[in-house]
């Protein structure tokens, strides 16, 4: 007998409800209690009369569960009720009823089937059916208690689908799977694993046997060690090689995976292994192929770099050739301009003076004739200087120019140079500043040095319109000698200073002062032949200083 305590906290009101208590109640109260129980449950409770094949009673659960009204399901024949049971479940349900009536089923056995709701949806129920003992053997009745298990069945179906899917995967995989309990016993294994054992052992059933029975004795220690790690929650994976009697090497990968239940307790271990020999062979082939491809790529990259370098060298040569051609065209243009201007004036002077002498020479006195002769002489000298400048620039830009340094008495050389300029330009003043008590010999190319200083002094004379003193200063610096040429002439405008060493370039402030624009280019080239440097500083109307540094060769 089962006791149902209403309230265990109150001992003085500890009332027990049992069959005897109900029997002692008056019938009206009994009916009230039964109705309350029947109407409060969510399950379907029904009364089946075997003789009449009718369901004569249904509680309110049928209306809540299936959506039918009381009038639709008040008293219905078994055939009508069977129509609401899924066709696949009808015969099983009827057989179950017959078995209960015949006494072939145990007390309180249940059957699961599907009932159709009013909206056409099928719903699973677990129905516990038992005989109602009334003492009337002819009019036998059954009580059915159907509980909604639809959600449970859906979960079970989901699990079944997942189990089928997982089983299909395991049966078609390359790996060998063994599911072991904590005592090493095989719970299940996939087809590959079973075939693997079948080839080695003369039996068909392996479930329930310890896997240690199928391992070589020398491997059981290692297996047990790895297995115990999995039992404490540490997954293990490693690879190992095996050498057969023919000396062929095979590689296998082994894994021990702990399996947990809903409470996170480790209840079993999945032991699996797979043959890695072919995979390793393929991987090695891929590595070798990759290396071969890398070598080819590197080789081709090297070839491309060489091609690019050759192309760049060709492009550089073409660019240099184009620049030289462009420079040559510019030189030609500047030279034509020079000829048209610088050559025209002295040639005109020579022509006019010659014509005057031819026509009126007999009538001129000595003074007048000398005047025209001097003009012709000066024009001829101007043309000669111009031609020497052109020849000098050609010489300075030629790679075949002779550089012939020798020990030179610098002071004697400079004194002679200044003396020549004082004779040529008597209206100008020249000053030589030479350190006292210093050595006088230095390794120089006298011819090239003469061109350098003559050009600088000539420019200083030409642009010193006020006839201020022009200075040459010499400074000895260890293995260097420095020449400084200073004037107080027109100076060089700031915007022209980056161009003054270019061929045929002339400053914007030179006005009508004659010149070729060749001198400073010659200076730069001849200084570089000495491995020296040239720099300057200048301000308009303040004058210019050129600094020439030449190392000892």
Image (spheres, helix red, strand yellow):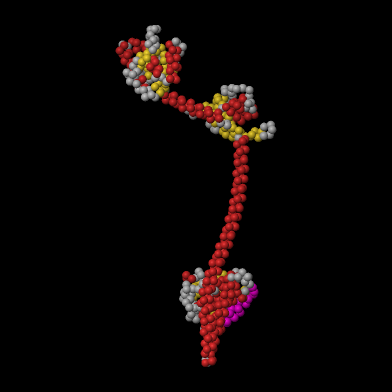
Q: Quadrant of residue 441?
A: bottom right
**Magenta part, dominant SS:** helix
Quadrant into which the C terminus falls: bottom right
Was residue 411 drawn as part of the magenta stretch in this picture? yes
Residue at the limit of the structure toward the left, as seen here: 28
Q: Residue at x 43, y 11 (%)?
A: 101
Task: State the image coordinates of residue 309 (x, y, percent, origin top left).
Answer: 59, 57
Determine if residue 345 is in view: yes
User: Residue 530 location in percent, x, y?
Assistant: 60, 71
How many numbered marks have been drawn onto this rendered protein structure? 0
Q: Is residue 307 a member of the stretch shown in magenta?
A: no
State the extent of the magenta-drawn residues as a range: 404-421
Q: Is residue 265 visible?
A: no
Rendered position, 521 above or below 67 = below
Residue lying at 55% horizontally and 76% vertically, measured from the top left: 455
* Residue nearest the observer in this picture, 277 or 296: 296
414 or 115, nearer to the observer: 115
Q: Residue 112 falls in which quadrant of the image?
A: top left
On the image, the x and y values in percent for residue 73 come to: 34, 18
Q: On the rendered image, what quadrant is the N terminus found in?
A: top left
123 w.r.t. 283: above or below: above
Relative to 340, 108 lies left or right:
left
Is 296 left or right of 23, judged from the image as shown?
A: right
In the rendered view, tell whether residue 204 sits above or below residue 98: below
| 519 is higher (above) or lower (below) than 243 | below
> Residue 448: horizontal and vertical position, in percent?
60, 74
Q: Residue at x 60, y 70 (%)?
A: 398
Q: Residue furthest right?
A: 246
* Quarter where residue 392 is shown: bottom right
């Amino acid at each position: 007998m089962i006791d149902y305590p209403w309230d265990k906290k109150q001992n003085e009101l500890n009332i027990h409800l049992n069959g005897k208590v109900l029997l002692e109640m008056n019938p009206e109260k009994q009916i009230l209690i039964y109705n309350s129980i029947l109407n409060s449950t969510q399950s379907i409770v029904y009364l089946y009369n075997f003789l009449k094949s009718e369901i004569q009673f249904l509680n309110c659960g049928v209306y809540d569960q299936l959506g039918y009204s009381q009038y639709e399901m008040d008293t219905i024949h078994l055939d009508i009720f069977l129509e609401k049971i899924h066709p696949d479940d009808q015969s099983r349900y009827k057989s179950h009823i017959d078995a209960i009536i015949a006494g072939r089923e145990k007390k309180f056995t249940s059957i699961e089937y599907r009932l159709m709701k009013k909206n056409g949806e099928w719903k699973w129920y677990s129905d516990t059916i038992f005989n109602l003992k009334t003492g009337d053997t002819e009019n036998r009745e059954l009580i059915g208690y159907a509980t909604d298990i639809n959600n449970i069945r859906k979960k079970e179906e989901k699990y079944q689908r997942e189990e089928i899917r997982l089983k299909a995967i395991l049966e078609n995989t390359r790996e060998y799977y063994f599911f072991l309990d904590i005592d090493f016993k095989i719970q299940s294994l996939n087809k590959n694993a079973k075939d693997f054992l079948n080839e080695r052992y003369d039996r068909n059933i392996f479930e329930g046997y310890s896997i240690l029975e199928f391992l070589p004795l020398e491997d059981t220690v290692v297996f047990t060690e790895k297995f115990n790690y999995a039992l404490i929650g540490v997954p293990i994976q490693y690879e190992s090689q095996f050498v057969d009697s023919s000396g062929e090497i095979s590689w296998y990968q082994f894994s021990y995976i702990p399996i947990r239940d809903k409470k996170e307790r480790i209840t079993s271990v999945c032991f699996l292994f797979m043959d890695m020999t072919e995979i390793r062979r393929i991987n090695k082939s891929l590595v070798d192929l990759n290396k071969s491809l890398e070598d080819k790529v590197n080789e081709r990259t090297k070839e491309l770099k060489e091609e690019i370098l050759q192309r760049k060298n060709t492009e550089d040569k073409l660019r240099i050739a184009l620049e030289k051609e462009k420079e040559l065209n510019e030189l030609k243009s500047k030279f034509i301009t020079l000829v048209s201007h610088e050559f025209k004036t002295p040639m005109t002077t020579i022509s006019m003076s010659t014509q005057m002498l031819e026509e009126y020479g007999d009538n001129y006195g000595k003074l007048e004739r000398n005047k025209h002769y001097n003009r012709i002489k000066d024009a001829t000298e101007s043309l000669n200087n111009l031609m020497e400048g052109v020849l000098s620039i050609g010489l300075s830009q030629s790679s075949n120019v002779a550089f012939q340094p020798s020990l030179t008495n610098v002071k004697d050389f400079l004194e002679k140079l200044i003396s020549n300029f004082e004779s040529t330009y008597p209206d100008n003043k020249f000053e030589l500043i030479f350190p006292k008590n210093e050595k006088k010999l230095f390794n120089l190319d006298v011819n090239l040095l003469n061109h350098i200083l003559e050009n600088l002094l000539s420019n200083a004379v030409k642009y010193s319109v006020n006839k201020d003193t022009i200075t040459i200063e010499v400074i000895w610096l260890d293995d260097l000698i420095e020449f400084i040429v200073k004037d107080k002439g027109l100076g060089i405008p700031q915007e022209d200073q980056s161009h003054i060493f270019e061929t045929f370039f002339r400053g914007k402030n030179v006005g009508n002062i004659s010149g070729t624009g060749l001198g400073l280019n010659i200076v730069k080239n001849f200084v570089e032949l000495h491995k020296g440097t040239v720099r300057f500083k200048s301000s308009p109307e303040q004058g210019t200083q050129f600094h020439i540094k030449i190392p000892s060769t």
